[in-house]
Image (cartoon, rainbow, N blue to C red):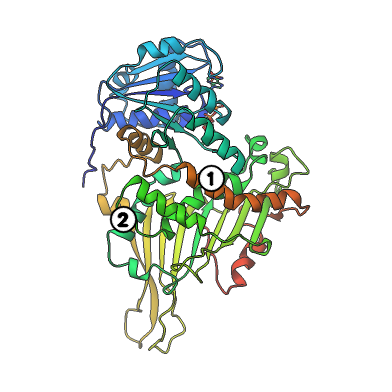
Amino acid sequence: MVVRVIPVDDFDLVIFGATGDLARRKILPGLYRRFLAGQMPSSARIIGAARSDLTEQQFRDETRAAIDEFAPGIDTSQLEAFLAELHYVAIDAKGTGGWEKLKEIMRPGVVRAFYFSVAPSLFGDLAQRLSDYGIADGESRIVVEKPFGRDLESARALNDVLARHFAERQIYRIDHYLGKETVQNLMAVRFANILFEPLWNAQYVDHVQITVAETVGVGGRGGYYDQSGAMRDMVQNHLMQLLCLIAMEPPYHFDPNAVRDEKLKVIRALEPVSEAEIVRGQYQAENGTQGYLDDAENPDSRTESFVALKVRISNWRWQGTPFYLRTGKKLRARTSEIVITFREPPHSIFDESSQKPNQLVIKLQPDEGMILTVMIKEPGPGGMRLMQVPLDMSFADAVGPEGVDMPDAYERLIMDVIRGNQTLFMRGDEVEAAWAWADPIIKSWEAGKARPEPYDPGSSGPEEALRLMHRDNRRWREIRA
Ligand code: NAP
C-alpha cells in the first residue's frame, strides 16, 4: 500500500531559532522529507530567523549540512529545489532589527505560521513583535516548543503572554509524542472498532503500564536537566498525554476541541499521588562511566533521572484499575510502550497453571506497532496444554513492506499546523491541569530531604520501582528494545 500524501495549502513558515539544535536536527530535515513526498506546494517558503548574521546562501548551506548530518542517505535529487525555497532574516527577538524586513517578505493570501524554536523566555517578545509589526494576523498560527512552563504558575504566565496576542485556536503547543503514528492509531483502534471498547474499563482491565525508557544519560545537557528532572521533563507532558489517550472517553467527534475536552477530563480526575507510590532514582557511576551527579556537575543534586509512580483515575470507567508510569535515563534499552493487561477469565476450564492474562502492547519506540497476546493450545499431541502467543501488527508489515515513508512526528505535526488542525496539540487548559497535578509532587520533593534511590546504568531502574508493582502482585513488562 502506498501512503497517501495530501498536499497542504501554500504557506510561509518562519522558524525562529532556525540556527539552533532542534531546527537542524528535526525541523529542517523533516520539512525536506515532506517536500520530497510532494506534500509541500512548490511555492511554499521557509524563512529562517535568528540573531546570527547569515546570508541567505549561508543559511541554505547550513541547512544542506544539517540534512546531510541528520537525514543521512536521504534522496537528494530535490535538495536544490528545496533549498531554493529557503530564506533568512537576521532578527533579535528582543530588538528592533530585521522585523520590517520580515514583514516585507511575507506574502499575503497564504497560511502564515511561526515556529518558536527558541527558549520559552523569548515567547513573549516574539508574540509581541509579531503583533506590533503587523506580521501576524487573526489567521496566523504559532508553534511553541516544550518545556511549557516548569510549574503551574510559569505555565499560566506563558499562556497569558501568548493570549495577549493570539487566540487559543492559533496556538499549537507541540508534544512530539502525539505526532507518532501509533498514538493516532491508538485512537483508531479504540474508537473505530467494536472489539476493544467494551473491554476498555476497570471491569476487564487489570492495570495499565506506560514506560518511556532511554539508554542515554544527561551528559552534555546535565545543567539544564538538573533544573528539571524526569517528572517535569517526561511525566507531566509525554506520559500524561499517553495516559489521557488510553483513559479518555470517546469524544463525540474526531474534532480538536472534542478530543482535548476528553483528555482534560482525565487529567482533572487524577487522584493526588502519595509518597509511598512514587519512586525516584538517579543512575550511578559504573565502570568508568559517569553517574548522574557527575553528569549534572552537582554532587548534591536531588533531581531524579528516573521516576515510577502509581496513578489512579477517579471516575466510573477506571475505578480500581491503576496506571503505572515509569521513565528514566540510562536504562536497559530505548523503548516507549504502553501495556494494557486484561483480567484473567473469571473461571478456567483448563487444569492448567500456564494461564496468562491477555495483554495489548502498544509500541511507540523504537519501532511502532501493536501486539496482542492470546492464549492458544500448544500445538501437537500430548494433551491440552496452553501457551501464550503474540498477534503482532507492526505497521510496516500492515501497510506494505517497502516504499512506505511514514512521516516522523515533527513532520506530521508541522503539516497539521499548516492544515489548521489542533487535534494533536496540547490546549492551554490541558497543560495547566497537568501542572496542577504534578506540582504538589514536585514541591514535596523539593521541600523534603530525601534523596533519589541509586540505580545501575543498564538496569530497569531502582529495585524499589520493581517493588512498587510486586506489592500489588503485578510485574513490569521487561524493558527491551
Ligand atoms: P538552541 O540550540 O540553543 O537554539 C536556540 C536558537 O534560538 C538559535 O537558533 C539561536 O540563534 C536563537 N536565538 C537565541 N536567542 C535569540 C534571540 N534573542 N532572538 C532570536 N533568536 C534567538 O536551542 P534548541 O535546542 O534548538 O531548542 C529550541 C527550543 O526547542 C527550546 O525551547 C527547547 O526547549 C525546545 N526543544 C528542543 C529540543 C531539542 O532536541 N533540541 C527538543 C524539545 C524541545 P542565534 O544565537 O543565532 O540567535
Q: Dividing the picture into quarters, in which one does residue 170 lie?
A: top left
- In the rendering, at what x and y percent does residue 244 appear? 45, 55
Asked whether mark 1 and ligand 1 are closer than 8 Å, the reply comes as no
Quick check: can you spot residue 350?
yes
Q: Disc number at residue 322?
A: none
Q: Position of residue 256 (x, y in %)?
A: 35, 45
Q: Is mark 2 on a helix, strand or loop?
A: loop
Above or below, 258 against 25 in this view is below
Depicted 17 relative to depicted 363: above or below: above
Query: Number of callouts in the render?
Result: 2
When asked about the image quadrant of residue 82, the answer is top left
From this view, report whether residue 105 is shown above or below residue 278: above
Residue bearing the label numbered 1: 432
Residue lying farthest to the front in this orientation: 164
Residue type, numbered disc 1: Glu
Left or right: 213 as drawn, with respect to 33: right
Q: Residue at x 27, y 33 (%)?
A: 37
Residue 214 in view in this figure: no
Q: How far apart are marks 2 and 1 (CA)?
A: 23 Å
Image location of residue 163, percent across then percent down: 48, 32
N-term-proximal mark, 2 vs 1 = 2
Task: For the residues labelled 2 and 1, say whether their Cβ atoms are less than 8 Å apart.
Answer: no
Residue 179, percent across and down? 39, 43
Q: Rate crowding at label 2 as few (under 14), some (14 to 19) or many (20 or more) other CA atoms within 10 Å.
A: few
Q: Residue at 38% of width from left, 60% of height from top?
A: 249
Q: Does 408 sit above or below residue 465? A: above
Q: What residue type is labelled 2?
A: Tyr
Q: Name the residue under label 2.
A: 252
Disc 1 secondary structure class: helix
User: Which residue is pictured at 34% across the width and 28% down the height?
Assistant: 139
